[in-house]
Amino acid sequence: MFNALRMAALTAALAAASAGAFASTNGTAVYGKAVASANAQRTVTLTAATAGVNVDNGDTVEFKTASGERFTWHFDTLTGESAFQLAKIAPAGSVDPKVVVYVGANPLYR
């Protein structure tokens, strides 16, 4: 009985710790993370006509906004495929909220 309780407590602690690794207070951790521009594999220039951007899970992309701002993002989503507003990961006010990022499955795992 004691071992069962200890195992249940350990399992709960591990679950709580791993949940924290996938979430963050601003929600960006579920989409990946900001990285240095030197790590970019490609650059995407956003214009007023940009409605969406296609990337693969695992890609590192530098975005150049219409206002001249730049930010680089490594896409590491929790699911193989997803879509979300680019504004969720961009510097505040730098990207039109209508622009959507479509994240495809990593080709290494297809």
Image: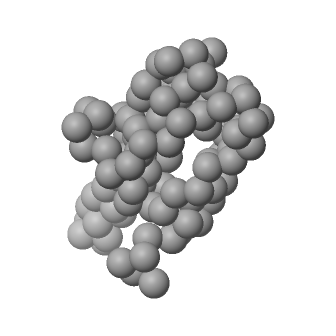
Q: In which quadrant will I find the C terminus?
A: bottom left
| Up-down relation of residue 49 to residue 94 (above or below) | below
Which quarter of the picture shows residue 35? top left
Counting from the top left corner in percent of width and height, residue 28 is at: 49, 36
Q: Which residue is pictured at 49% across the width and 30% down the height?
A: 64
Left or right: residue 80 versus residue 15 is right
Along the viewing direction, whichever of 90 and 51 lies nearer the viewer: 51
Given residues 59 and 26, the one toward you in this image is 59
Q: Quadrant of the N terminus?
A: bottom left
Q: Is residue 100 left or right of residue 66?
A: right
For residue 49, side relative to residue 41 (left or right): right
Residue drawn at 43 percent across, 25 percent down: 70
Q: Nearer the viewer, residue 107 or 27?
A: 107
Q: Which residue of the protein is positioned furthest toward the bottom in this rendering?
A: 110
Residue 29 visible in the current orientation? no
Residue 75 pos. (x, y %): 43, 51
Residue 61 at x, y percent in the picture: 41, 45
Residue 57, image quadrant = bottom left
